[in-house]
Image (cartoon, rainbow, N blue to C red):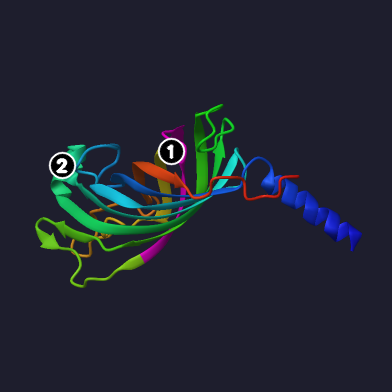
Amino acid sequence: MKYFFSVFLLLLSVFCNGQKIPEMGILLGKGNYNGELNPTQQFSSDGGGLAFGGVFRYNLNPRYALKATAIYTKIRGNDDIADLEFGQIRNAEFESNLLELSTQIEFNFMKYTIGDWSQPFSPFLFVGLSAFQYNPQTTQDGVDVRSEDIKQWGVAIPFGVGFKVNLFSRFGLSAEWGFRKTGRDNIDGLINNNLELPDFENGKDYDNDWYSIIGVSLNYRLTKKNVCPSNF
């Protein structure tokens, strides 16, 4: 019993080291798709649209935080973006609404806490797991690729970088750019094998689609003081 109690106190001291503080925030930014219909561009309006959502962050200590987000955005792509001869022959485009629910862990390079002006900013890294819903509306040569309106779910690995800075005693601002590795090749709705042209390859099965989100969030610290016992 003493052993388990000692382990419990040790874990409590690790998580309570510094400040254990929850935050809530709102995010505004832009979504972007990368795949056969947009191989490289990141910030073009042809790759995506407005992204917005909510953020909940639970700071375990000034270095580590757990984060949950719900983000809605629009992604799109077309063969005119790459401006390749192959794309002009394929002549495909798509647009899709995308809803993402994500959990992530963040690492601050500096000991950052909203309201602590001894270290008012810090860059950070994050990685996590996301579930996303998409519904591509895709055309090729002006003809709809799909005849049904079907929403699909997928799983992605989000990772990226960001920067946090204090604004006021209980408000902070964070900016981040995160990529999502999806493991799927149908986010754009493009059919890789065209049955009418069996020798013509629309896309590559091994070239999975990605999407990214760049955004800024305004965060509000929910507690004034450390919620852990003072002796920790």
- 231, 198: nearer the viewer: 231
Residue found at x 57% / y 30% = 110
Which label number is shown at residue 80? Answer: 2
Residue 173 x %, y %: 40, 37
Residue 170 x %, y %: 46, 41
Circle 2 Cα neighbour tier, 10 Å, few/some/many (<14 / 14–19 / ≥20) = some
In the picture, the quarter occupied by the N terminus is bottom right
- 107, 170: nearer the viewer: 170
Which label number is shown at residue 147? Answer: none
Q: Is residue 187 above or below residue 221?
A: below
Residue found at x 61% / y 47% = 20
Question: What secondary structure is the magenta-colored segment mainly?
Answer: strand
Helix, strand or loop under label 1: strand
* Residue interval drawn in magenta: 153-173
* In the image: residue 216, left or right of residue 6: left
In the picture, the quarter occupied by the C terminus is top right
- 91, 193: nearer the viewer: 91
Which label number is shown at residue 172? Answer: 1
